Amino acid sequence: MEKSSFLANLECGWCRREYEPDRLWNLCPDCGKPLLARYDLRAVARAVSPRDLPGREPSLWRYRELLPLRSDRFKLSLGEGYTPLMRAYRLEKEIGHGPLFIKDEGLNPTGSFKARGLSLAVSRALELGIKSLSIPSAGNAACALSAYAAAAGLEAHVYLPADVPRPFITECRVLGAQVHLIDGLITDCARAAREDLEKYGRFDVSTLKEPYRLEGKKTMGYELAEQMDWALPEVIVYPTGGGTGLVGMWKAFEELEKLGWIGSKRPRLVTVQAEGCAPMVKAFHEGKEFAEPWSEASTIADGLRVPAAVGDFLILRALRESRGTAVAVSDREILEATYLLGRTTGIWPAPEGGATLAALRRLQQEEWIKDGQSVVLFNTGNGARYSRLWD
Ligand SMILES: *Cc1c(COP(=O)(O)O)cnc(C)c1O
């Protein structure tokens, strides 16, 4: 039998207890923290090398051996991942910092990098026999779940804040999902979803509450390495909500080093949040291991309106291990940077993408970062769905 996945077990990110990987799990049954997929990396290193990659499909599935799906029969792909990494020459001139790259995640199916995580999570749920899926979301994750559930023929229930911009709702409906609008924030959506989960026996694909969205999002780390010819940038600026992408990339770099594909040099990771919802920034600067939930969270960057994250300790650990930092920017700075990014690159960014540029400018002023240090900004989504912003 051809072995297409080298998934070995699931390990709790907190208590390190191990779990059997071919059953469905949410959080660690023992301590309630996220489970992380572990692979037989020695076997992966024997099976594949960077030289094998150039001929492979231009999606995240090019890293097939490092993904958890057992059988390709259940693979759901809409062209997610392998997004371009663009050098932003005009923006470099404008702000006086280079080299500067944009990883444009807005080109993913349903317009955001949420497609990466949900491609894997839904494929794996399909493989393990799930029929109905549920997600609380600020918008983008709901669209991505709707798309992959439609591709799989599974039922999707999406729980969105009632004030989410209309295009997100429309897209979920067109893709066949059941839309539940909830008064409140994403944490209130999570509560409503949880009540229904128990009642109807649905599987919860909230971020980091099942192990495979992380596996989809970690591929951003593989791509950066491959696209930069196996030399990572000096700084990565990442708009952090639940932190899946940041934690995922940190995990990806560790895996690549164990495979011998990169050395031990790592980028410094920067978390950006909005001043109106900055639980990670606060916890980072206070030296805490966990973040306290943020009250009255508010920002124009919907994906950053996440008052509490189950993976908080994983985010804080990655920031510290990388000698990175955390920055909070105002909605006004976010909006200005979003327009600046747009008019100098040709990319219509999501405000979360704009936030990364606002953070970079802050780090320039504070001289935390110096001209000549290579920086990658993540534009995590396409701006078009954020209808309220542009009116
Ligand atoms: C979800 C989302 C984020 C936050 O992503 P995490 O990996 O959960 O921190 C950032 N930007 C956009 C556009 C999002 O949809």
Image: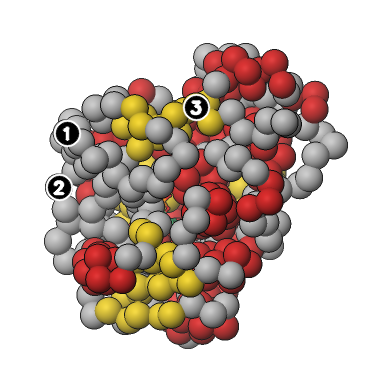
- Which of the two labelled residues, at mark 2 and mark 3, occupies the earlier sequence position? 3
Q: Quadrant of the N terminus?
A: top right
Q: Give neighbour class at mark 3: few <14, some 14-19, many 20+ (Cα, 10 Å).
A: some
Q: Is residue 103 above or below residue 191?
A: above
Residue topped by disc 1: 288
Q: Secondary structure at mark 1?
A: loop
Rounded to the nearest whole Å, what is the CA distance between mark 2 and mark 1?
Answer: 9 Å
Label number found at residue 269? none
Q: Give neighbour class at mark 1: few <14, some 14-19, many 20+ (Cα, 10 Å).
A: few
Quadrant containing ligand 1: bottom left
Residue type marked 2:
Glu
Residue topped by disc 2: 292
Residue type marked 1:
Lys
Q: Nearer the viewer, residue 260 or 127?
A: 127
Q: Please say if the residues under marks 2 and 1 sit with CB atoms less than 8 Å apart.
A: yes
Q: Nearer the viewer, residue 288 or 81?
A: 81
Q: Nearer the viewer, residue 19 or 298?
A: 19
- Which of the two labelled residues, at mark 1 and mark 3, occupies the earlier sequence position? 3
Residue 71 visible in the picture: yes
Residue topped by disc 3: 8
Q: Is residue 45 above or below residue 101?
A: above
